[in-house]
Image: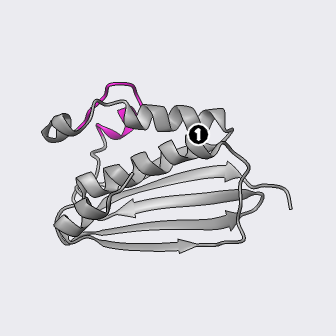
Amino acid sequence: MDFEAAWERKGLQIEASLDEAVAVTADRELLSLVWNNLISNAVKFTGPGGHIRVDLEEEGIGAVVTVSDTGCGISPEVGPHIFEKFYQGDSSHTAQGNGLGLALVKRVVDILGGEIGVESQIGQGSVFTVRLRRRPE
């Protein structure tokens, strides 16, 4: 997906730090669903002038990808439910999605034998962390 127009319109600052030596063996299309959803949500929930960062690094036998933003954040009440189908914690964005995105992301990460988690604070933003097994060298 092309998010460039959306982040330019909002004046978002985008940064990436990708360790090119880190590789995983997984279905490219499935992983594309994960990254597109996480980045799309970061763009959607980050206000004008905000910041989004994507990092890829090695961690033991795994690869860790973090997508962080300075968006509106997720409340402690909503957090435990964000990976459930059709759950939408922020009804102001209902027209922009159907509540399936993060449930699909969770399902794909599970299929790939990985883990996904989120840390978030209201008004401070969110950090989604995806851990996958690295490709054997």
Q: Is residue 17 above or below residue 30?
A: below
Q: What secondary structure predominates along the stretch shown in magenta?
A: loop
Can you tell which quarter of the image residue 62 is in?
A: bottom right
Residue 134, horizontal then vertical, whole percent: 75, 55
Horizontally, residue 97 falls left or right of residue 127, namely left
Neighbour class for label 1 at 10 Å: few (<14), some, many (≥20)? some
Q: Residue at x 29, y 47 (%)?
A: 74
User: Horizontal and vertical percent for residue 112?
Assistant: 66, 38
**Residue at screen point 26% across, 33% down:** 88
Image quadrant holding the C terminus, namely: bottom right
Disc 1 residue type (three-letter): Val
Q: Is residue 96 above or below residue 125?
A: above
In the rendering, at what x and y percent does residue 29 appear? 57, 42
- Give the residue displayed 18% in from the left and 34% down from the top: 94
Q: Which residue is mark 1?
A: 109
- Residue 78 shown in magenta: yes
Residue 68, quarter of picture? bottom left
Residue 133, above or below 108:
below
Q: Is residue 40 magenta?
A: no
Bounds of the magenta segment: 77-89
- Left-right relation of 119 to 135: left
The extreme top residue here reads: 85
Q: Position of residue 85 (x, y in %)?
A: 38, 25
132 horizontally vs 129: left or right: right
The secondary element bearing badge 1 is classed as helix
Q: Nearer the viewer, residue 112 or 78?
A: 112
Give the colour scheme shown: one colour
Q: Check the image and name the residue furthest to the right.
A: 137
What residue sits 66% from the left and 72% below the top?
Answer: 20
Q: Quadrant of residue 47?
A: bottom left
* Total count of labels: 1
